[in-house]
Image: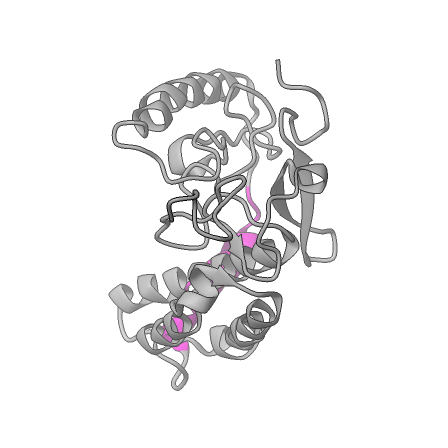
Amino acid sequence: PKDGAPPGMMGPSVGGASAGLAIHKSEGLAPINDRCATDIPGLYAAGDALGSHMSGGIYTQIGSSLAGSAVQGAIAGEEAATYAKQVVLQRIPATKREQIKDEILAPLKRESGYSPAWVTQTLQGILIPNFVLYIKRGAILQAALAYVEELRDHHLPMLIAKDMHELRLAHETRNMIISAEMKLRASMFRTESRLSHYRLDYPEMDDQNWRAWINIYKSADGQMKLEKQPFGTWPDGTKIR
């Protein structure tokens, strides 16, 4: 229009291009300092595995991933090596090793159940529609989450694998479902629109309440919990300098 931008197009920019419900460099482990450390002692992360938010809420630009792979990788490697020199190795009990082995190989031992390919296709059908992936509303997100919870509770325990290749797919499918639940819950939790996160029921940015990242963690009782981390702070609330 001659008189300016179209109706509804004024104000801060929201919306954007993203291949999924999250942005690279924002969906990994939350760092607790500038040395790539996490809240798990001895575990360091870099690149896409570290939620450094170096690109904010938009998709990274060409070449910017070098900051994650090269710079963060070098820092994390040095810090992990320093930690490893002083750590005392712990012996894992045989019973615990057998338990882990049984859990990993369980899909190979089941005689009936759901194939990883079928469960993955079902999950894609839930998440891929544009009204779940891009143009979000609370009611639709809640409905999608209900389907994902159904897969988590009643299909994951019945995943089957005919060989080692399908075993890998089974564990990838398990991880995809956990990731989908995290992203849906985070999208519901953030009651505003900001950059590539767009809520049709909350179309405006809300700086008063939402100048914050969302951290997701497992509580003591094994439940998925979400919390805000204000911009410019570490997870413990201290200011980033």
Range of magenta residues: 92-109
Report which quarter residue 108 is drawn in.
Answer: bottom left
Q: Residue furthest bottom?
A: 112
Task: Give the residue at x 71% y 41%.
Answer: 209
Report which quarter residue 187 is drawn in.
Answer: bottom right
Look at the magenta stretch and give its main secondary structure. Answer: helix
Q: Is residue 140 left or right of residue 228?
A: left
Which residue is at the front of the view, 223 or 27? 27
Q: Position of residue 214 (x, y in %)?
A: 61, 43
**Is-magenta flag for residue 103?**
yes
Which residue is at the front of the view, 6 or 187? 6
Q: Position of residue 232 (x, y in %)?
A: 63, 24
Task: Give the residue at x 25% y 32%.
Answer: 62
Q: Is residue 136 visible?
A: yes
Q: Is residue 209 left or right of residue 13?
A: right
Task: Give the residue at x 60% y 44%.
Answer: 205
Q: Is residue 239 above or below residue 46?
A: above
Q: Is residue 116 left or right of residue 81?
A: left
Task: Give the residue at x 34% y 53%.
Answer: 19
Q: Position of residue 126 (x, y in %)?
A: 44, 73
Q: Position of residue 90 (x, y in %)?
A: 57, 34
Q: Residue furthest front?
A: 2
**Is-magenta flag for residue 100?**
yes
Total count of labels: 0
Q: Is residue 151 above or below residue 28?
A: below
Q: Is residue 160 visible?
A: no
Q: Is residue 129 left or right of residue 35?
A: left
Report which quarter residue 143 is drawn in.
Answer: bottom right
Q: Quadrant of the C terminus?
A: top right
